[in-house]
Image (cartoon, coloured by chain):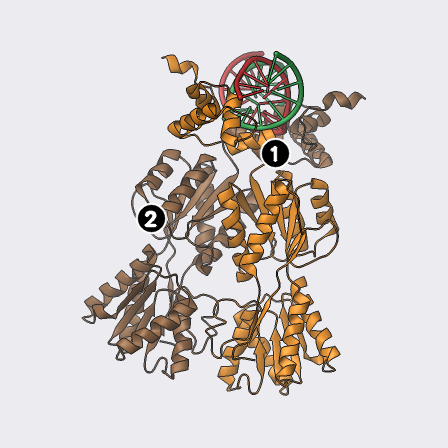
Chain colours: A orange, B brown, C red, D green
Amino acid sequence: MATSTLRKTRSTGRPTLEEVAQRAGVSTITASRALRGVGSVGPDYVERVKAAATALNYVTNPAARALASSRSDAVAVVIPSISNAVFVDVLESIHSVLRPRGYEVLIGNSHYSRQAEEDLIRHYLASSPGGLIVSGFDRTESARRLIDASGVPCVHIMELDEAAGVHCVGFSQTRAAQAVAEHLVSRGCRRNAFVGAQLDSRTMQRGEGFREALKRLGLYDPDLEVLTPSPSSIGLGCDLFRQLLQRRPDVDGIFFGNDDLAQGALFEARRQGIEVPSRVAIVGFNDLAGAADCVPRLTTVRTPRVEMGRVAANLLLAMIDREPIAQPAVDLGFELVVRESA
Amino acid sequence: MATSTLRKTRSTGRPTLEEVAQRAGVSTITASRALRGVGSVGPDYVERVKAAATALNYVTNPAARALASSRSDAVAVVIPSISNAVFVDVLESIHSVLRPRGYEVLIGNSHYSRQAEEDLIRHYLASSPGGLIVSGFDRTESARRLIDASGVPCVHIMELDEAAGVHCVGFSQTRAAQAVAEHLVSRGCRRNAFVGAQLDSRTMQRGEGFREALKRLGLYDPDLEVLTPSPSSIGLGCDLFRQLLQRRPDVDGIFFGNDDLAQGALFEARRQGIEVPSRVAIVGFNDLAGAADCVPRLTTVRTPRVEMGRVAANLLLAMIDREPIAQPAVDLGFELVVRESA
DNA sequence: CTGAAAGCGCTTACAG
DNA sequence: CTGAAAGCGCTTACAG
């Protein structure tokens, strides 16, 4: 058969660029350029190549492309948790802008471990991804150096840093916590507690912002800070609330570092017959699912998760395409949503 | 310089297998075999190669490996939603067994669309992944054919199918729903409703199992089936519960297709002063976060999400390694967790 | 605007 | 047990 001469020994069976080029009657490289839309190719050629590709059901072999160009169509996103709805929302948002642009989104879950994050960053950087998105700024020096040395475009999400050369999209965790403190105090709470779990850098920043604001208002009581390294959850919220009220029955305002803790507290309060917000006001963080519907409806801080993912992905895209960056650090703000619990 | 002869024109700067081999004083292919642990290589050689790789900080270029072997170290997982905690749990579990084995887990989110799923499957199959994990069996004929024709090992999760040649890990949605129906009836509920959202195949199977069981018990009332294509959420649970009780105030048992709907119903019941379970019993599905802590604590069906991910990933690994498969269809069962709401 | 040649960094298939 | 050669399917760099 005439076609048998085309068959390569180790062929995968799928059509190659060469076959597309042959069918279109052009050279392989012209077909490559036509399909990628780069370089100058005669419009008639472009059309013929595209037609041939469609007819053959051609799909670029990503491995071959990556090897030849030493640049992959992958973007790695390293987050500390995949169970925390906060990151899932951001991820989904990043996904929705990157996938349509042809990027593969690789998800690295560090489980809140600095060492695991460093390993993941090393792993992903090893395959020369098109871009990298990481969470916050709390990482090992090695990880930081790996990112710098790689030259791979990198966007930081969740937090803000004005340092030159750092690209980030987030909001001020500190200011958000201050807003919560001011709200609690303005509604008359005098003994305000902060309850934080996981102890990741963002939770700590919230604690700090809360503390600073209370100090400024002359209402800070170190005995009302409850911190635990356990992962945040509704069940933990129940426990911490119960313990806190047992130890300090005089507390009249509580700021929880995450909504799930606050929702747990609401359940526990109900079980113990403790009125919210009249006896103790409760504020959460993030405005996760259920916050608007629970009883009483939860007062919380709405964080810009969807927008953060979208803006970060677009910023990364601009960096990858070497477009000029108007604003390397984007503050998306937050919103205190006052409902019934405080 | 002597080393300049080693420098390739388009080098990426990272060490290559050739450099490792050179340092170890062996051929490239021997280094390749030593590092992969395949073929027969003298133990002393293996040691020297590994030492050289470590010294050079060598990391295999995945694109080159994939191109040469026409087989990638990626496993694609296609799920219908990334916001639904059910899939996040399974995903995390799959991740935890595949990543340590060197696989990259690619996540495809079909957003419950058959067409989107087909496109994702086509996309992932195009890059010859090592394996594929898909959710359930409800997909387009094209998607099914693509999977079959690809020859890529594929495991189905969430549901069960006894069909020969199909590898799956899940549990019977139907039987789980039957157990719920029997529980409600056994505790005295006579007018039992089913409330399902999203209308994905698993929700429909639950509805069917529930209906069949009630029919068998002579208690089926078609007017008590509430179905909506809206995505499942706590807020939707509030709405559907309110509407149902307005329309059929005599209902005394409700089975919600997912815990979030049930939790919403619990909130709404509280707001309306409707006693649960004395006036109406409520059962959820999946035993998601919060089910054990809400008020009243939710009676629900615990689904084996973590185990499902683990078993599916290991089954896939066995298929990839062409090991004999003892059991192509694994039924992991479920557990009715009776708490306070029913 | 178009193309022939070389190369990306591995692994397969074949020898010995 | 070890290796020289060829090839995977693209893109880069250089010509014309």
Mark-to-mark CA distance, 2 and 1: 35 Å
Asked whether, in this view, residue B323 is left or right of residue B277, the answer is right
Q: Depth check: A88 or B131 in front?
A: A88
Q: Where is B96 relative to B174, above or below?
A: above
| Residue bearing mark 2 | B137
The C terminus of chain A, quarter of image: bottom right
The quadrant holding residue B103 is top right
Number of other residues with Cα within 10 Å of mark 2, as a class: few under 14, some 14 to 19, many 20 or more: some
Residue A205, given in percent of the width and then of the height, sits at 69, 66
Residue A133, given in percent of the width and then of the height, sits at 62, 49
Q: Depth check: B289 or A102 in front?
A: A102
Q: Secondary structure at mark 2?
A: loop
| Discs 2 and 1 carry the same chain letter | yes
Q: How many marks?
A: 2
Q: Secondary structure at mark 1?
A: loop
The quadrant holding residue B269 is bottom left
Q: Image point 52% across, 23% down: which residue?
A: A30
Three-letter amino acid code at disc 2? Phe
Q: Which mark is residue B341?
A: none
Residue A280, given in percent of the width and then of the height, sits at 58, 84
| Residue bearing mark 1 | B61
Q: Image point 74% across, 20% down: which residue?
A: B5
